[in-house]
Amino acid sequence: MPLINLIHEQRLLVRQREQKIRILMLATLSIGVFAFLATGFNLFNAARFQVMVGSLEAKKKSLEPLMKKLKSNELDQKTLEPKLTTLTSATKATEQWFHLMNYMTVNIPGSVWLSSLKTNQAPDAEAGITVTFGGYSLNHDEIGEILLRLEACPDLEGVTLKFSQERLVEKNKLLEFEISAILQGSRVVKKIKEKESA
């Protein structure tokens, strides 16, 4: 029987096992190092976030008086909102009357004298505010001219001549007239709600 060298094969097997063990040890060690670094990174981030939370809490505490003031201002704004709405609508109405009076100042013919200006709110809000101009003129042409000029006024609509008649004023014969119009934007449009069938 020939002699077989089994030591060499055994040594090769031992070397292969040692090499596998080294590879497994290196893999385990690298996984451990990676896990250690990941844990360190997460701990660092957690500490950083804790510092940020503390900073934000401090800022929140410093902003609490401002937040209380803001809430107080919001309540004041809600309280004052109806008054502001009323004041805004009153300002718009005043501006509209200012524009109308300014228009009248420029556009009344020289031989026409206005003696009255009356307004009345109709019981029905859809009719709007009626403005009635009363005055005197020397002739019908001037009354027609003021009627045309009032129709061109952007603050009036539905301008109509109610009457014109001859009148004796301080021994002079003048034509008395009355013109009515609706103030632009004073009509309230009723909204009709359609009922939905169920």
Image (cartoon, rainbow, N blue to C red):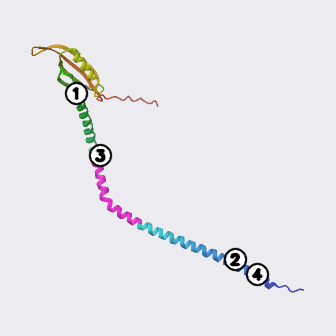
Residue 5 as seen in the image, left or right of residue 154: right
Q: Residue at x 25, y 41 (%)?
A: 83
Q: Quick one: SS at disc 2?
A: helix
Between marks 2 and 4, how big is the CA–CA gap?
A: 12 Å
Q: Residue at x 57, y 74 (%)?
A: 33
Q: Could you say where residue 38 lies in the image, as x and y percent from the top left?
A: 54, 70
For the image, the number of numbered tags is: 4
| Crowd class of label 1 (few under 14; some 14 to 19; many from 20; radius 10 Å) | few
Q: Which residue is mark 1?
A: 106
The mark nearer the N terminus, 4 or 3, is: 4
Name the disc covering residue 20, or none. 2
Q: Callout 4, which amino acid?
A: Leu
**Circles 2, 4 touching at the beta carbon (< 8 Å):** no
Q: Residue at x 73, y 78 (%)?
A: 16
Please tell me in which quadrant of the rendered image residue 101 appears: top left
Q: Residue at x 30, y 56 (%)?
A: 68
In the rendered view of the protein, which quadrant contains the N terminus? Answer: bottom right
Q: Could you say where residue 129 lies in the image, as x and y percent from the top left?
A: 25, 27
The boundaries of the magenta stretch are 52-79
Of labels 2 and 1, the one closer to you: 1
Q: Which residue is mark 4?
A: 12
| Picture layout, residue 107 above or below residue 167 | below
| Picture layout, residue 29 above or below residue 86 | below
**Circles 4, 3 touching at the beta carbon (< 8 Å):** no
The mark nearer the N terminus, 2 or 4, is: 4
Between marks 2 and 1, how big is the CA–CA gap?
A: 109 Å
